[in-house]
Image (cartoon, grey):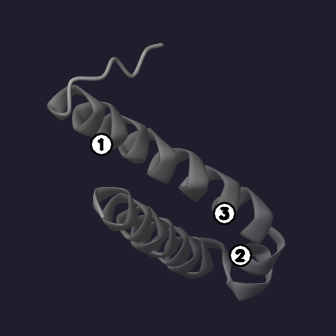
Amino acid sequence: MRYEKIYYKFIATLLAFSTLMFCVWALIAGIEKAREMLFVITVLAACLSVKGTIHEVCAYCKEIGRDCAK
């Protein structure tokens, strides 16, 4: 159950970061440039989302008495 919550939070965070970065890039450089940079924006958003998810999974593992480093 907890893993599902973490997964859904990851998906929501990824979507939010991607949308936010795309909108900012579109405002700064224009919609054409933003479309060209969509892959880079998505990869960067995924990296940021995973970073938060890893910390959340490690915290959950420590809660249940497991070492996430192994």
Residue placed most toward the observer, 57 or 34:
57
| Residue located 43% across and 63% down the image | 7
Rendering coords of residue 31 (x, y %): 70, 86
Q: Choose mark 2 or mark 3, whichever is in front.
A: 3
- Snapshot quadrant of residue 30: bottom right
49 vs 56: above or below? below
What secondary structure is marked by label 3? Answer: helix
Distance, label 2 to label 3, CA atoms, is 11 Å
Q: Amino acid at mark 1?
A: Glu
Foreground of the two, 29 or 23: 23
- Indicate which disc, 1 or 2, sits on the residue closer to the N terminus: 2
> Is mark 1 in CB contact (under 8 Å) with mark 2?
no
In the rendered image of this protein, does residue 47 appear above or below residue 10?
above
Answer left or right for 36 relative to 59. Answer: right
| Amino acid tagged 2 | Ala
| Left or right of residue 36, residue 54 in this image | left
In the depicted view, which residue is nearer to us: 36 or 45? 45
Q: Which residue appears farthest toward the bottom when viewing the image?
A: 31
Q: Residue at x 50, y 75 (%)?
A: 15
In the picture of the structure, the residue carrying the numbered disc 3 is 42
Which element is circle 1 on?
helix
Which numbered marker is on residue 56? 1
